[in-house]
Amino acid sequence: MTHLELWIPGPTEVSAPVLAAAAAPAIGHRTKEMCALYDALVPGCREIFGCERGVVLFGTHSATGFMEAFTRNGIARRALHIVNGAFAERWKLISDACEKANAVLEIPWGRAATPQELEAFLDRDRDFDAVALVHNETSTGALAPLEQLAAVVKRRLPDAMLLVDAVTSAAATPIRFDDWGLDGVFTGSQKALALPPGLALAAVSKRLLEKAQQLPGRGYYFDLVDLAKNGVKSQTPTTPALPQLSALKVQLERIAASGGCAARYARHAALAARTRAYCDERGFPSFTAPEFLSPTVACRENGGLDVAAWVKGLRAKGFLLSEGYGDLKSRTFRIGHMGDHELAGLERMLAASDAVLRELGWKR
């Protein structure tokens, strides 16, 4: 066993060609080579975000950094946070920490907001200049109907910024930044893109950048205006994560060579379907409501299984899986089926899971 194979909701497995790219010799970050690397990344990122009219940005930080950047740059008066899990809750806490007024549309964990629920909330309160939501809630495996929610925001709050966490959805399911009228979307390198951690990617609208220019307190490191200004020169304000940028270039080339984003979306859908079928057959019902099932994370009820023992047994066989997140730890487990995983690898992991279940005397 060379390493534990990762079937957690991130970081995900990194393929050998991508790892090799990350280990390439460093280049100067103020050189023509860096500018060429930057320019090579933008078209593939535009495809992943569905963004031709906006601006692509790169950050040397976790995706949470763009949560704070969008908060500081996109909220002037008051934000609406749609909270349906731990990471949506984190974004609300970041707004609090940045002293941004906000309100919460609270949705039970395991679900996402429906357009009807958002409409009803806005019937009571529309005093918002930004709406923040999570496309795919990693803690519960709930995928929001982003296109429909965006349509409600654009109709009811046409001047509000629509800000989206796409950490475990980007590169696994379609996002249409331009067509859906989004203003800010971000993701992290270590999820469906299957890169080493340490790089965050975002798409931002020109109207978000125009708004940000008028806002005080954007900070220094998370100033989207400064990031975009440097991006025009194919640069970043500070030294970027050069190994991850090199890895991203190779990964975008690999995605294009293997059928593009459409093929990647189809593979993720197949992985999700097989994982759901396995869990259903073994007596682990979905924690996530059926209309919101994620293409990248299966969150399942443990049905009385000793999940810690199951995880330990799988670890001994070379696979790392995850217990539930936060308050759901004792009730659920999560399988991350995203990135460069293939069905054959999933079958190997599921066979190992069956072996551990037999060892534990699981009879379902």
Image (cartoon, rainbow, N blue to C red):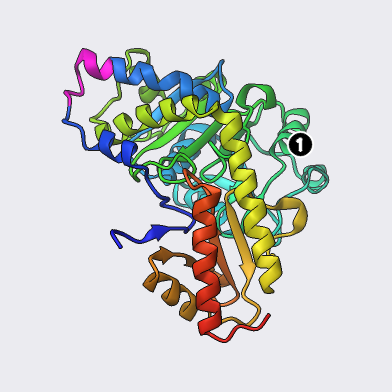
Left or right of 238? Residue 178 is: right
- Whether residue 11 is visible: yes
Q: Quadrant of residue 69?
A: top left
State which region is magenta.
Answer: 27-35
> Which one is nearer the viewer's eye here, 252 or 293?
252
Q: Secondary structure at mark 1?
A: helix
Q: Is residue 284 above or below residue 84?
A: below
- Whether residue 307 is visible: no
Q: In percent of the image, x 55 and y 81: which residue is there? A: 358
Q: Which residue is mark 1?
A: 148
Residue 52: x and y in percent read 56, 16
Residue 197: x and y in percent read 35, 46
Bin the neighbour count of mark 1 within 10 Å (Cα to Cα): few under 14, some 14-19, many 20 and up: some
> Which one is nearer the viewer's eye here, 131 or 359?
359
Q: Quadrant of residue 80?
A: top right
Q: Is residue 115 above or below residue 274?
A: above
